[in-house]
Image (spheres, rainbow, N blue to C red):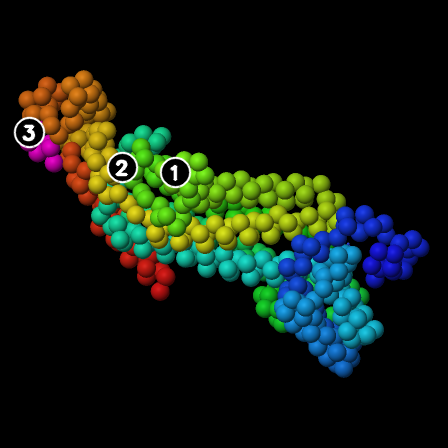
Amino acid sequence: MAGQKKPWGGRFSEPTDRKVEDFTSSLHFDKRLYPYDIEGSIAHCRMLAAQEIISSGEAEKIISGLQDILQSIEKGEFSFSSDLEDIHMAIEKSLIDRVGDVGGKLHTARSRNDQISLDMRLYLRDEVKNILDLLAGLQTSLVDVAKREIDTILPGYTHLQKAQPVLLSHYLLAWWEMLDRDASRLRGCRDRLNVMPLGSAALAGTGFPIDREYVAELLDFPGISRNSMDSVSDRDFVAEFIFDAGLMMMHMSRFCEDLVIWSGGEFGFVNISDAFTTGSSIMPQKKNPDVAELIRGKTGRVYGDLIAILTIMKGIPMTYDRDLQEDKEPLFDAVDTVKACLAVLSDMTGNLKFNRGRMLEAAAGGFSTATDVADYLVMKGIPFREAHGIVGHLVGYCIEKQKDMQSLDIEEIRLFWKDADDNIYACMSVNGSINARNIAGGTAGEAVLRRIKEIESMAL
Ligand code: ARG
Protein backbone atom coordinates (compact mmCIF):
# COMPACT_ATOMS: atom_id res chain seq x y z
CA MET A 1 0.00 0.00 0.00
CA ALA A 2 3.06 2.28 -0.35
CA GLY A 3 1.85 5.45 -1.98
CA GLN A 4 -1.80 4.42 -1.41
CA LYS A 5 -4.22 5.95 1.05
CA LYS A 6 -4.24 4.25 4.45
CA PRO A 7 -7.51 3.41 6.27
CA TRP A 8 -6.50 6.22 8.62
CA GLY A 9 -5.15 8.43 5.82
CA GLY A 10 -7.91 11.10 5.74
CA ARG A 11 -5.90 13.86 7.33
CA PHE A 12 -2.67 13.02 5.48
CA SER A 13 -1.64 14.67 2.24
CA GLU A 14 1.60 12.73 1.66
CA PRO A 15 2.03 8.96 1.45
CA THR A 16 3.94 7.10 4.14
CA ASP A 17 7.63 6.62 3.50
CA ARG A 18 8.42 3.03 2.46
CA LYS A 19 11.01 2.67 5.22
CA VAL A 20 8.50 3.89 7.77
CA GLU A 21 5.98 1.35 6.57
CA ASP A 22 8.50 -1.42 7.10
CA PHE A 23 9.61 0.03 10.39
CA THR A 24 6.14 0.35 11.89
CA SER A 25 4.60 -2.85 10.55
CA SER A 26 3.99 -5.66 13.01
CA LEU A 27 2.23 -7.96 10.58
CA HIS A 28 5.11 -10.40 10.19
CA PHE A 29 4.84 -11.31 13.88
CA ASP A 30 1.29 -10.39 14.93
CA LYS A 31 -0.31 -12.44 12.15
CA ARG A 32 -0.35 -15.38 14.55
CA LEU A 33 -3.17 -13.53 16.35
CA TYR A 34 -5.53 -13.97 13.37
CA PRO A 35 -7.95 -16.53 14.92
CA TYR A 36 -8.38 -14.33 17.99
CA ASP A 37 -8.74 -11.15 15.97
CA ILE A 38 -11.49 -12.76 13.92
CA GLU A 39 -13.21 -14.33 16.93
CA GLY A 40 -13.22 -10.94 18.70
CA SER A 41 -14.51 -9.16 15.60
CA ILE A 42 -17.36 -11.64 15.17
CA ALA A 43 -18.44 -11.15 18.79
CA HIS A 44 -18.19 -7.36 18.44
CA CYS A 45 -20.26 -7.49 15.25
CA ARG A 46 -22.99 -9.63 16.83
CA MET A 47 -23.21 -7.13 19.67
CA LEU A 48 -23.41 -4.17 17.26
CA ALA A 49 -26.37 -5.87 15.56
CA ALA A 50 -28.07 -6.84 18.84
CA GLN A 51 -27.83 -3.20 19.91
CA GLU A 52 -29.12 -2.07 16.51
CA ILE A 53 -25.99 -0.04 15.86
CA ILE A 54 -25.74 -1.92 12.56
CA SER A 55 -28.52 -3.95 10.89
CA SER A 56 -28.68 -7.71 11.16
CA GLY A 57 -28.26 -7.99 7.38
CA GLU A 58 -25.05 -6.00 7.58
CA ALA A 59 -23.82 -8.12 10.48
CA GLU A 60 -24.47 -11.31 8.51
CA LYS A 61 -22.40 -10.04 5.58
CA ILE A 62 -19.55 -8.99 7.84
CA ILE A 63 -19.56 -12.26 9.77
CA SER A 64 -19.59 -14.42 6.67
CA GLY A 65 -16.75 -12.31 5.24
CA LEU A 66 -14.75 -12.84 8.44
CA GLN A 67 -15.41 -16.58 8.34
CA ASP A 68 -14.21 -16.60 4.75
CA ILE A 69 -11.01 -14.88 5.75
CA LEU A 70 -10.46 -17.37 8.57
CA GLN A 71 -10.80 -20.28 6.15
CA SER A 72 -8.55 -18.72 3.58
CA ILE A 73 -5.81 -18.09 6.19
CA GLU A 74 -6.16 -21.62 7.48
CA LYS A 75 -5.84 -23.05 3.98
CA GLY A 76 -2.71 -20.95 3.43
CA GLU A 77 -4.40 -19.02 0.62
CA PHE A 78 -4.48 -15.62 2.30
CA SER A 79 -1.81 -13.18 1.24
CA PHE A 80 -0.48 -11.11 4.10
CA SER A 81 0.59 -8.07 2.16
CA SER A 82 3.76 -6.71 3.70
CA ASP A 83 2.67 -3.10 3.42
CA LEU A 84 -0.30 -3.51 5.73
CA GLU A 85 0.41 -2.25 9.21
CA ASP A 86 -0.82 -5.06 11.39
CA ILE A 87 -3.15 -8.04 11.63
CA HIS A 88 -6.15 -5.82 12.34
CA MET A 89 -5.60 -3.77 9.18
CA ALA A 90 -4.88 -6.87 7.10
CA ILE A 91 -8.17 -8.46 8.11
CA GLU A 92 -10.20 -5.26 7.81
CA LYS A 93 -8.82 -4.52 4.34
CA SER A 94 -9.54 -8.03 3.14
CA LEU A 95 -13.05 -7.83 4.63
CA ILE A 96 -13.82 -4.65 2.71
CA ASP A 97 -12.37 -6.22 -0.47
CA ARG A 98 -14.69 -9.20 0.02
CA VAL A 99 -17.97 -7.69 1.24
CA GLY A 100 -17.70 -4.10 0.08
CA ASP A 101 -18.19 -0.87 2.03
CA VAL A 102 -20.34 -2.54 4.68
CA GLY A 103 -17.08 -4.11 5.96
CA GLY A 104 -16.10 -0.61 7.07
CA LYS A 105 -18.88 -0.72 9.68
CA LEU A 106 -17.14 -3.42 11.73
CA HIS A 107 -14.81 -0.92 13.36
CA THR A 108 -17.73 1.11 14.79
CA ALA A 109 -17.31 1.70 18.54
CA ARG A 110 -13.90 0.07 18.52
CA SER A 111 -10.26 1.07 18.27
CA ARG A 112 -7.19 -1.00 17.55
CA ASN A 113 -6.12 -0.11 21.06
CA ASP A 114 -8.87 -2.15 22.72
CA GLN A 115 -8.81 -4.68 19.88
CA ILE A 116 -5.15 -5.58 20.41
CA SER A 117 -5.68 -5.86 24.16
CA LEU A 118 -8.50 -8.32 23.47
CA ASP A 119 -6.48 -10.34 20.94
CA MET A 120 -3.53 -10.66 23.31
CA ARG A 121 -5.77 -11.85 26.14
CA LEU A 122 -7.57 -14.40 23.99
CA TYR A 123 -4.25 -15.68 22.65
CA LEU A 124 -2.58 -15.95 26.02
CA ARG A 125 -5.62 -17.57 27.63
CA ASP A 126 -5.34 -20.36 25.06
CA GLU A 127 -1.59 -20.70 25.40
CA VAL A 128 -1.79 -20.84 29.19
CA LYS A 129 -4.08 -23.81 28.77
CA ASN A 130 -1.61 -25.49 26.40
CA ILE A 131 1.26 -24.82 28.77
CA LEU A 132 -0.68 -26.17 31.76
CA ASP A 133 -1.22 -29.40 29.79
CA LEU A 134 2.48 -29.64 28.95
CA LEU A 135 3.40 -28.96 32.58
CA ALA A 136 1.09 -31.75 33.70
CA GLY A 137 2.82 -34.02 31.17
CA LEU A 138 6.23 -33.31 32.68
CA GLN A 139 4.84 -33.84 36.18
CA THR A 140 3.44 -37.19 35.10
CA SER A 141 6.83 -38.22 33.68
CA LEU A 142 8.46 -37.35 36.99
CA VAL A 143 5.96 -39.41 38.97
CA ASP A 144 6.32 -42.35 36.59
CA VAL A 145 10.10 -42.37 36.96
CA ALA A 146 9.76 -41.91 40.73
CA LYS A 147 7.56 -45.03 40.89
CA ARG A 148 9.96 -47.01 38.72
CA GLU A 149 12.88 -45.93 40.93
CA ILE A 150 10.99 -45.95 44.20
CA ASP A 151 13.83 -47.52 46.27
CA THR A 152 16.80 -46.18 44.33
CA ILE A 153 19.28 -44.42 46.58
CA LEU A 154 20.94 -41.15 45.68
CA PRO A 155 23.57 -39.14 47.51
CA GLY A 156 21.89 -35.84 48.42
CA TYR A 157 24.07 -32.74 48.08
CA THR A 158 24.35 -29.33 49.62
CA HIS A 159 27.02 -27.00 48.21
CA LEU A 160 27.50 -29.84 45.67
CA GLN A 161 29.25 -31.69 48.51
CA LYS A 162 27.88 -35.04 49.54
CA ALA A 163 25.46 -34.38 52.41
CA GLN A 164 22.94 -37.12 53.26
CA PRO A 165 21.51 -40.10 51.40
CA VAL A 166 18.04 -39.66 49.96
CA LEU A 167 15.75 -41.62 47.67
CA LEU A 168 15.92 -40.73 43.99
CA SER A 169 12.11 -40.81 44.01
CA HIS A 170 12.10 -38.09 46.69
CA TYR A 171 14.47 -36.03 44.56
CA LEU A 172 12.25 -36.41 41.47
CA LEU A 173 9.17 -35.36 43.41
CA ALA A 174 10.98 -32.18 44.48
CA TRP A 175 10.75 -31.09 40.84
CA TRP A 176 7.09 -32.10 40.82
CA GLU A 177 6.44 -29.68 43.70
CA MET A 178 8.20 -26.83 41.90
CA LEU A 179 6.17 -27.44 38.77
CA ASP A 180 3.02 -27.55 40.86
CA ARG A 181 3.73 -24.02 42.08
CA ASP A 182 4.37 -23.03 38.46
CA ALA A 183 0.95 -24.37 37.50
CA SER A 184 -0.72 -22.48 40.30
CA ARG A 185 1.02 -19.25 39.27
CA LEU A 186 -0.16 -19.76 35.68
CA ARG A 187 -3.74 -20.28 36.81
CA GLY A 188 -3.51 -17.05 38.83
CA CYS A 189 -2.12 -15.23 35.79
CA ARG A 190 -5.00 -16.56 33.71
CA ASP A 191 -7.57 -15.35 36.27
CA ARG A 192 -6.16 -11.82 36.07
CA LEU A 193 -5.92 -11.66 32.29
CA ASN A 194 -9.38 -13.13 31.80
CA VAL A 195 -11.09 -9.75 31.58
CA MET A 196 -12.83 -8.37 28.48
CA PRO A 197 -11.42 -4.98 27.42
CA LEU A 198 -13.50 -4.19 24.29
CA GLY A 199 -15.52 -1.00 24.61
CA SER A 200 -12.56 0.91 25.99
CA ALA A 201 -12.04 2.07 22.40
CA ALA A 202 -9.06 4.38 21.96
CA LEU A 203 -8.82 5.32 25.63
CA ALA A 204 -12.01 7.02 26.77
CA GLY A 205 -14.69 4.42 25.99
CA THR A 206 -17.35 5.01 23.35
CA GLY A 207 -20.53 7.04 22.97
CA PHE A 208 -22.31 4.20 21.14
CA PRO A 209 -24.84 2.25 23.21
CA ILE A 210 -22.77 -0.96 23.24
CA ASP A 211 -23.30 -3.98 25.50
CA ARG A 212 -19.93 -4.98 26.88
CA GLU A 213 -21.33 -7.75 29.06
CA TYR A 214 -22.79 -9.45 26.00
CA VAL A 215 -19.42 -9.39 24.23
CA ALA A 216 -17.81 -10.84 27.37
CA GLU A 217 -20.40 -13.62 27.41
CA LEU A 218 -19.89 -14.42 23.73
CA LEU A 219 -16.13 -14.68 24.26
CA ASP A 220 -16.41 -16.58 27.52
CA PHE A 221 -14.92 -13.92 29.78
CA PRO A 222 -16.17 -13.91 33.38
CA GLY A 223 -16.10 -10.10 33.49
CA ILE A 224 -15.28 -6.80 31.78
CA SER A 225 -12.49 -4.31 32.46
CA ARG A 226 -13.49 -1.38 34.65
CA ASN A 227 -11.44 1.52 33.39
CA SER A 228 -11.00 2.28 29.70
CA MET A 229 -7.67 4.06 30.21
CA ASP A 230 -6.21 1.17 32.21
CA SER A 231 -7.54 -1.36 29.67
CA VAL A 232 -5.73 0.04 26.66
CA SER A 233 -2.44 0.66 28.42
CA ASP A 234 -2.26 -2.43 30.63
CA ARG A 235 0.27 -5.13 29.78
CA ASP A 236 0.67 -6.44 33.34
CA PHE A 237 -0.59 -9.81 32.17
CA VAL A 238 2.21 -10.02 29.61
CA ALA A 239 4.91 -9.24 32.15
CA GLU A 240 3.31 -11.58 34.69
CA PHE A 241 3.13 -14.44 32.23
CA ILE A 242 6.75 -13.99 31.14
CA PHE A 243 7.84 -13.96 34.78
CA ASP A 244 5.93 -17.21 35.34
CA ALA A 245 7.56 -18.65 32.23
CA GLY A 246 10.95 -17.47 33.51
CA LEU A 247 10.48 -19.36 36.78
CA MET A 248 9.40 -22.47 34.92
CA MET A 249 12.51 -22.19 32.79
CA MET A 250 14.65 -21.73 35.88
CA HIS A 251 13.21 -24.91 37.38
CA MET A 252 13.80 -26.86 34.18
CA SER A 253 17.28 -25.38 33.88
CA ARG A 254 18.26 -26.54 37.37
CA PHE A 255 17.00 -30.06 36.70
CA CYS A 256 18.93 -30.06 33.43
CA GLU A 257 22.04 -28.87 35.22
CA ASP A 258 21.86 -31.93 37.50
CA LEU A 259 21.41 -34.15 34.46
CA VAL A 260 24.44 -32.61 32.77
CA ILE A 261 26.59 -33.19 35.85
CA TRP A 262 25.22 -36.65 36.58
CA SER A 263 25.61 -37.89 33.02
CA GLY A 264 29.32 -37.01 32.99
CA GLY A 265 31.83 -39.83 33.46
CA GLU A 266 32.95 -38.61 36.88
CA PHE A 267 29.45 -39.01 38.32
CA GLY A 268 27.97 -41.60 35.97
CA PHE A 269 24.61 -41.59 37.79
CA VAL A 270 22.40 -41.30 34.75
CA ASN A 271 22.35 -42.24 31.12
CA ILE A 272 20.43 -39.87 28.89
CA SER A 273 19.09 -41.95 26.02
CA ASP A 274 20.79 -41.64 22.60
CA ALA A 275 17.64 -40.11 21.18
CA PHE A 276 18.12 -37.08 23.43
CA THR A 277 21.85 -36.55 23.02
CA THR A 278 24.13 -35.55 20.18
CA GLY A 279 27.67 -36.41 19.09
CA SER A 280 30.75 -34.35 18.44
CA SER A 281 31.94 -33.57 14.92
CA ILE A 282 35.55 -34.22 15.95
CA MET A 283 35.64 -36.50 19.01
CA PRO A 284 34.15 -39.91 18.12
CA GLN A 285 33.69 -40.98 21.74
CA LYS A 286 31.45 -38.04 22.72
CA LYS A 287 27.79 -38.23 23.65
CA ASN A 288 26.72 -34.76 24.72
CA PRO A 289 23.70 -33.70 26.79
CA ASP A 290 22.85 -30.90 24.35
CA VAL A 291 19.11 -30.94 25.00
CA ALA A 292 19.66 -30.31 28.69
CA GLU A 293 22.23 -27.63 27.90
CA LEU A 294 19.91 -25.92 25.44
CA ILE A 295 17.11 -25.80 27.98
CA ARG A 296 19.60 -24.23 30.41
CA GLY A 297 20.64 -21.74 27.73
CA LYS A 298 17.11 -20.90 26.62
CA THR A 299 16.34 -19.88 30.18
CA GLY A 300 18.51 -16.83 29.52
CA ARG A 301 16.35 -15.97 26.51
CA VAL A 302 13.16 -15.97 28.54
CA TYR A 303 14.81 -13.81 31.23
CA GLY A 304 15.69 -11.46 28.36
CA ASP A 305 12.02 -11.40 27.33
CA LEU A 306 11.07 -10.43 30.87
CA ILE A 307 13.60 -7.61 31.03
CA ALA A 308 12.39 -6.46 27.60
CA ILE A 309 8.72 -6.16 28.59
CA LEU A 310 9.47 -4.53 31.95
CA THR A 311 11.76 -2.01 30.27
CA ILE A 312 9.29 -1.31 27.45
CA MET A 313 6.60 -0.54 30.02
CA LYS A 314 8.50 1.58 32.48
CA GLY A 315 8.27 4.99 30.84
CA ILE A 316 5.02 4.80 28.91
CA PRO A 317 2.78 7.80 29.49
CA MET A 318 -0.91 7.03 29.92
CA THR A 319 -2.48 5.55 27.83
CA TYR A 320 -1.72 3.64 24.60
CA ASP A 321 1.64 4.39 22.98
CA ARG A 322 3.10 2.56 20.04
CA ASP A 323 5.87 1.18 22.24
CA LEU A 324 3.23 -1.33 23.33
CA GLN A 325 3.50 -3.06 19.95
CA GLU A 326 6.90 -4.26 21.18
CA ASP A 327 5.15 -6.47 23.76
CA LYS A 328 4.46 -9.20 21.22
CA GLU A 329 7.82 -10.62 20.25
CA PRO A 330 8.98 -11.16 23.86
CA LEU A 331 5.62 -12.73 24.72
CA PHE A 332 5.57 -15.02 21.68
CA ASP A 333 9.18 -15.97 22.25
CA ALA A 334 8.53 -16.85 25.91
CA VAL A 335 5.45 -18.91 24.96
CA ASP A 336 7.25 -20.78 22.17
CA THR A 337 10.37 -21.40 24.24
CA VAL A 338 8.64 -22.67 27.35
CA LYS A 339 6.38 -24.96 25.31
CA ALA A 340 9.27 -26.47 23.37
CA CYS A 341 11.30 -27.03 26.53
CA LEU A 342 8.43 -28.62 28.48
CA ALA A 343 7.66 -31.01 25.64
CA VAL A 344 11.22 -32.19 25.08
CA LEU A 345 12.06 -32.40 28.77
CA SER A 346 9.00 -34.61 29.48
CA ASP A 347 10.13 -37.10 26.88
CA MET A 348 13.76 -37.00 27.92
CA THR A 349 12.83 -37.51 31.58
CA GLY A 350 10.72 -40.56 30.81
CA ASN A 351 13.72 -42.13 29.05
CA LEU A 352 16.37 -41.55 31.73
CA LYS A 353 18.25 -44.66 32.88
CA PHE A 354 19.75 -44.42 36.33
CA ASN A 355 22.86 -46.28 37.41
CA ARG A 356 21.63 -47.59 40.76
CA GLY A 357 24.89 -49.25 41.81
CA ARG A 358 26.93 -46.16 41.14
CA MET A 359 24.56 -43.94 43.10
CA LEU A 360 24.41 -46.34 46.06
CA GLU A 361 28.18 -46.52 46.19
CA ALA A 362 28.43 -42.74 46.11
CA ALA A 363 25.69 -42.39 48.75
CA ALA A 364 27.47 -44.72 51.15
CA GLY A 365 30.79 -42.88 50.98
CA GLY A 366 31.76 -39.47 52.27
CA PHE A 367 30.45 -40.00 55.83
CA SER A 368 26.94 -39.25 54.59
CA THR A 369 25.40 -40.82 57.71
CA ALA A 370 27.44 -38.78 60.20
CA THR A 371 24.33 -36.78 61.18
CA ASP A 372 22.52 -40.05 61.91
CA VAL A 373 25.28 -41.08 64.32
CA ALA A 374 25.02 -37.70 66.03
CA ASP A 375 21.21 -38.09 66.25
CA TYR A 376 21.73 -41.56 67.79
CA LEU A 377 23.95 -40.05 70.49
CA VAL A 378 21.29 -37.41 71.15
CA MET A 379 18.77 -40.18 71.69
CA LYS A 380 21.17 -41.59 74.25
CA GLY A 381 20.94 -38.30 76.17
CA ILE A 382 23.94 -36.37 74.84
CA PRO A 383 23.22 -32.71 73.90
CA PHE A 384 23.29 -32.25 70.13
CA ARG A 385 26.25 -29.82 70.10
CA GLU A 386 28.38 -32.28 72.07
CA ALA A 387 27.24 -35.18 69.87
CA HIS A 388 28.21 -33.13 66.79
CA GLY A 389 31.70 -32.67 68.26
CA ILE A 390 32.12 -36.38 69.10
CA VAL A 391 31.12 -37.46 65.59
CA GLY A 392 33.31 -34.74 64.06
CA HIS A 393 36.32 -36.19 65.87
CA LEU A 394 35.29 -39.69 64.83
CA VAL A 395 35.18 -38.57 61.16
CA GLY A 396 38.61 -36.91 61.54
CA TYR A 397 39.99 -40.19 62.95
CA CYS A 398 38.52 -42.15 60.01
CA ILE A 399 40.07 -39.75 57.48
CA GLU A 400 43.45 -40.09 59.19
CA LYS A 401 43.23 -43.91 59.24
CA GLN A 402 41.65 -44.01 55.75
CA LYS A 403 38.68 -46.03 56.98
CA ASP A 404 34.95 -45.54 56.73
CA MET A 405 32.87 -45.40 59.93
CA GLN A 406 31.29 -48.80 59.54
CA SER A 407 34.68 -50.54 59.42
CA LEU A 408 35.84 -49.11 62.76
CA ASP A 409 35.81 -51.64 65.57
CA ILE A 410 33.90 -50.84 68.74
CA GLU A 411 37.09 -50.11 70.72
CA GLU A 412 38.04 -47.43 68.24
CA ILE A 413 34.58 -45.84 68.54
CA ARG A 414 34.86 -45.93 72.33
CA LEU A 415 37.94 -43.70 72.07
CA PHE A 416 35.43 -40.94 71.28
CA TRP A 417 32.33 -42.10 73.15
CA LYS A 418 33.04 -44.52 75.96
CA ASP A 419 29.46 -45.91 76.23
CA ALA A 420 29.29 -47.10 72.60
CA ASP A 421 27.94 -50.61 71.91
CA ASP A 422 27.21 -52.56 68.71
CA ASN A 423 23.80 -50.86 68.22
CA ILE A 424 25.61 -47.81 66.92
CA TYR A 425 26.42 -49.54 63.62
CA ALA A 426 22.75 -49.68 62.58
CA CYS A 427 22.46 -45.92 62.26
CA MET A 428 25.53 -45.78 60.04
CA SER A 429 23.81 -47.60 57.19
CA VAL A 430 22.38 -45.68 54.25
CA ASN A 431 19.05 -47.51 54.44
CA GLY A 432 18.78 -46.85 58.17
CA SER A 433 19.40 -43.16 57.56
CA ILE A 434 16.73 -42.94 54.86
CA ASN A 435 14.11 -45.04 56.65
CA ALA A 436 14.50 -42.94 59.81
CA ARG A 437 13.15 -39.89 57.97
CA ASN A 438 9.57 -41.09 57.92
CA ILE A 439 7.94 -37.74 58.52
CA ALA A 440 5.62 -35.86 56.17
CA GLY A 441 7.91 -34.33 53.54
CA GLY A 442 10.81 -36.64 54.47
CA THR A 443 12.77 -39.03 52.26
CA ALA A 444 11.79 -42.40 53.82
CA GLY A 445 10.25 -44.79 51.30
CA GLU A 446 6.93 -44.79 53.14
CA ALA A 447 6.81 -41.00 53.21
CA VAL A 448 7.53 -40.82 49.48
CA LEU A 449 4.85 -43.41 48.72
CA ARG A 450 2.33 -41.44 50.78
CA ARG A 451 3.10 -38.32 48.73
CA ILE A 452 2.76 -40.24 45.45
CA LYS A 453 -0.68 -41.44 46.61
CA GLU A 454 -1.69 -37.85 47.44
CA ILE A 455 -0.46 -36.61 44.06
CA GLU A 456 -2.29 -39.36 42.22
CA SER A 457 -5.51 -38.76 44.11
CA MET A 458 -5.28 -35.02 43.27
CA ALA A 459 -4.97 -35.86 39.58
CA LEU A 460 -8.20 -37.91 39.64
N1 ARG B 1 -0.22 -3.09 16.05
C1 ARG B 1 -0.60 -2.31 17.19
C2 ARG B 1 -0.03 -2.94 18.47
O1 ARG B 1 0.34 -4.04 18.41
C3 ARG B 1 -2.09 -2.29 17.29
C4 ARG B 1 -2.63 -1.05 17.93
C5 ARG B 1 -2.32 0.13 17.09
N2 ARG B 1 -2.89 1.30 17.60
C6 ARG B 1 -2.49 2.50 17.18
N3 ARG B 1 -3.12 3.49 17.69
N4 ARG B 1 -1.55 2.66 16.32
O2 ARG B 1 0.03 -2.32 19.48
Instruction: Quarter of the image for the N terminus: give it.
Output: bottom right
Q: Residue at x 10, y 25 (%)?
A: 408
Q: Residue at x 93, y 55 (%)?
A: 13
Q: Main secondary structure of the magenta part?
A: helix
Which kind of residue does numbered mark 1 sit on? Pro
Q: Give the CA distance from mark 2 to mark 3.
A: 27 Å
Magenta span contains residue 334: no
On the image, the x and y values in percent for residue 126 come to 56, 61
Residue 397 in sight from this viewpoint: no
> Left or right of 198: which side holds 358?
left
Instruction: Place residue 421 in its image quadrant.
Output: top left
Rendering quarter of residue 430: top left
Q: Evaluate if marks 2 and 3 touch, with contact meaning CB atoms under 8 Å apart.
A: no
Q: Magenta residues, as a range?
A: 419-426
Q: Which residue bears the numbered disc 1?
A: 284
Which residue position holds label 3?
421
Q: CA gap, disc 3 to disc 1?
A: 55 Å
Q: Quadrant of the C terminus?
A: bottom left
Mark 1 Cα shell of 10 Å, populated few (<14), some (14-19), many (≥20): few
Q: Give residue 170's position: percent from left, percent from top.
A: 29, 46
Front residue of 373/380: it is 373
N-term mark: 2 or 1:
2
* Cα gap from disc 2 to disc 1, whole angstroms: 31 Å
Q: In the rendered structure, are the residues bearing label 3 and label 1 in contact, judged by CB atoms less than 8 Å apart?
A: no
Q: Quadrant of residue 52?
A: bottom right
Residue hosting label 2: 155
Q: Earlier in the sequence, mark 3 or mark 1?
A: 1
Which numbered tag is attached to residue 28?
A: none
Which residue is at the front of the view, 343 or 457? Answer: 343
Q: Is residue 81 above or below residue 150?
A: below
